Amino acid sequence: MGHPGYKRDPESLRDNACEHPSRRPIWIGFAFLCLCLLRVMRGPGCYSSWPFRWDFLPRFGKNSSLAPFYAYSEGSGEFSKPQDFDIVALVPFHRREPTEILDCYLRKNLASNHGLVDQVIFLPQTDDTLSLEWLASIVKQNPSYTAAQDYTGLQPGHLRKDTMYIWIDGDTVFLEAHTISTIVKTKLEHHNIPLVSANVVSEAVLEALHNHPGIALPYLPELSPVQSSSETDAHDWHASKLPVWKGPGDFAVTADFSPPFTNHRWLLSDDYNYNRTPIGMSMYATNGPSMHHWTISAQQHYSFLHHLERNHLNHYKFPMWSVTSTNISSNFLCFWGNIATDQSSSQSDGMTFLNILEADSGPQNSIIDGKGLAVHWSSTQALEGLDSTDLLARYRSFAGDTVCNGT
């Protein structure tokens, strides 16, 4: 199956750097002061002789003229949009609510907004009238958006050979600012690798990795409703504003646990008893939920939002992981159009598409790029229970606060 590597990962280095958080600003400030004094003593005429560039300073200002996206890959740094080919996002569309959140991230990454994506093609997977009407409305508003004419969508045999495609499932509710640029850059650096997947949290082979204690936190379901103090609190994504979980000392999430009420929250337990959480019970108890149970997904999502607020997403990351194509998530894939131009299918769901691409790529492994995160809302098995939480509102709140503005 392969093993994740841990070299040359600029974000994972934060773990070591954070061991002495109070010292780092002091040393940085001291070093910067010394450089400034040295430059003054040498005089203005020596500016051009410095072995580094002083134009890194605008990075800290609001009017920076640097490229608006960054790529964590080999030679991490500013990454200009490739001009000799198009980048097209293929988005299977299931229903309005999650895709309404994804829409913010898609618009942010369009070439017309200084991103990488030239075109977004939605592939309808539903016959729900209201959802399709909403999809038609956003396609009409954005010239970079198009939609396939029917739910069978775009067949792999219709792909353009000289185009790079990014398959992003319509139920994706979070993308890091650099996820698309990093995945594209990694694909360009590994041209012969058939598929590059994003680091889709807790999916496929990454589920066991992201379920470790410390990444998956002891969140438990709120057992009775409470009156929210304000409408703002009810739609705030910050996990730190949630109260501590309260409940019976012997409470545990079992396989038959049902949603306690609509729009319920999950709260962090202060006793850190991991064994009674859904993930703990699934591993250590005979009556625990299966790994596809909605409570597992709820614990994973709330844990992610906890780390997101604290800027601890490095806990989820690794550089690259070479695995067989069957072990990667089918919800975020990057590939060239020539990988499957001779294949065809009457379906356009992610798993069918992945199977076609895998068959055409032969025995070669694919890559999971651990440096660019994505969060997928749910598998079909977990959907009913997960929709009873307030999680979608929290992801929508985060996107509204940090992504949608200005797009």
Image: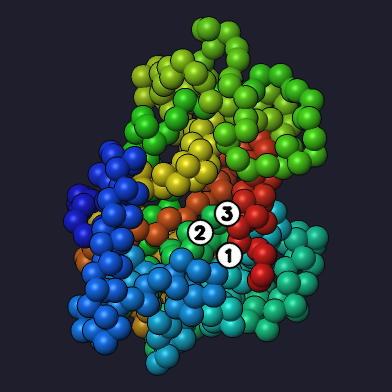
Q: Position of residue 200 (x, y in %)?
A: 43, 53
Count of marks placed on residues: 3
Left or right for 95, reference 78? right
Q: Is residue 208 above or below residue 10?
A: above
Q: Which residue is mark 2?
A: 175
Q: Position of residue 361 (x, y in %)?
A: 29, 71
Residue shown at 74%/23% (left/top)?
A: 225
Q: Which residue is mark 1?
A: 105
Q: Which mark is residue 181?
A: none
Element type at marker 2? Answer: strand
Looking at the rendered structure, the kind of residue marked 2 is Leu
Q: Which residue is mark 3?
A: 173
Q: Say whether disc 3 or disc 1 marks the residue closer to the N-terminus.
A: 1
Residue shown at 28%/39% (left/top)?
A: 20
Q: Position of residue 3 (x, y in %)?
A: 20, 50
Element type at marker 1? Answer: helix
User: In terms of depth relative to the viewer, which is nearer, 181 or 292?
Assistant: 181
Asked if the residue under mark 1 is in contact with the one under mark 3, i.e. CB atoms within 8 Å, the reply is no
| Occupied quadrant, residue 82 | bottom left
